[in-house]
Image (tube, rainbow, N blue to C red):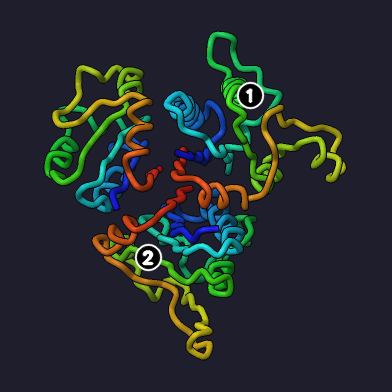
Amino acid sequence: MALLHTVNKSPFESNTFDTCLSLAKDGSTILLIEDGVYAATTGTGVAEKIKNASGISFAVLGPDLQARGLEGKLADGIKVVDYDGFVSLVADHEAVQSWL
Amino acid sequence: MKISIQINEGPYQHQASDTAYQFAKAALAAGHEIFRIFFYHDGVNNATRLAVPPQDDRNIGALWQELAKEHDMDMVVCIAAAQRRGMMDADEAKRQGLDADNIAEGFRISGLGQLIEAGIESDRLIVFGD
Amino acid sequence: MSVKKFMYINRKAPYGTVYALESLEVVLIGAAFDQDVSLAFIGDGVYQLTKGQNTEAIGQKNFSPTYAALGDYDVNKIYVEKESLEERGLTLDDLQHLVWEDEDEDWAEKDSIRLVSRAELADVLDEQDVLLNF
């Protein structure tokens, strides 16, 4: 059963992103929202972690990237979605695990 | 799909209520049904009728009211969390012998069972919080 | 009413914030709905289950005895993440001994806490229909 995981914390502020990564199974999707979008930026150790989690799909909420002025710093392999895309992801997965 | 949303934080303090609102709006636009919005923890503060936010920024409470009215959306404020934080509707205030109530129109106070029911009856339940 | 797998996820320590207490309140009310309920304690959430909590000096209610009552509410699948305990220098011995009575086995007392690895917990999470976070 594929879960949609959301993470709303900066990886530099809390361990939420790491916890999510450690409990997300291959085939699931991790959507970064709110302050969680900082995990999608280049030039950080987090980008390596994302690359190594090859069985997991990563997405980031575009509006939260824009709000934080991060659009030019997006790491590779992360799909940008808007709120409509967020809704689609919810519909396409069996359940949602909101990591807070 | 029937979608329910749990909101754990109050307006402005965290982005939770904002994100939940944008999500709910998009879900409705996509033709989904919002079964229930359930406000828990400090989320009950979204229901205050006394907020006067600055004019040049969004009025979160009002946005929820408008969305709920337009789509006949059920917005529930948890009674246990509300009592702790001093959020009262008229009936509850009277029952408690208090001289004021502060729940805005469109929000109703009810028990935690409404959250469980939302989980049972909906196809998806999403939590927004801190 | 259909039966769904409900999981309550706890990742925060008690008393510093209200989430532990108010999450427990949902579990108790939820117990009346006859769903397939599990609790997961991950990260600092494991601190909620420690023995010997004495809240007198901080002036808060000590709600830790409530965990011991969960068995009576048919809430008996309590997953505790092994790595989270180890990282915090804790063992199962530091946690309350939570039990439930199996009426199908002559009310035999059984452990409610299931110590699981991250990998095992990931599998359990994947099976859930409704995941509540606080």
Toward the top, the furthest residue is: B56
For residue C119, what is the image quadrant?
A: bottom left
Comparing B118 with B54, the one in front is: B118
Question: Can you see residue B15?
Answer: no
Say if B55 sits above or below A94 in the image. above
Residue drawn at x 29%, y 43% is A17
Residue A88 horizontal side relative to residue C57, left or right: left
Q: Dot 1 lies on which element?
A: helix
Say if C55 sits above or below A11 in the image. below
Percent of width and height locating residue C129 = 41, 54
Which numbered marker is on residue C75?
Answer: none
Q: Dot 2 lies on which element?
A: strand
Residue corresponding to mark 1 = B69
Residue corresponding to mark 2 = C80
Distance from label 1 to label 2 (Cα)? 43 Å
Residue drawn at x 50%, y 83% is C102
Q: Chain of mark 1?
A: B
Q: Quadrant of the C terminus of chain B?
A: top left
Question: Can you see residue C38?
Answer: yes
Residue A74 horizontal side relative to residue C56, left or right: left
Residue drawn at x 38%, y 56% is C128
For residue C67, what is the image quadrant?
A: bottom right
Comparing C52 with A14, the one in front is: A14
Q: Quadrant of the N terminus of chain B?
A: top left
Comparing C85 with C129, the one in front is: C129
Percent of width and height locating residue A34 = 37, 30
Count every numbered label the image shows and give the total: 2
Residue type at numbered disc 1: Lys
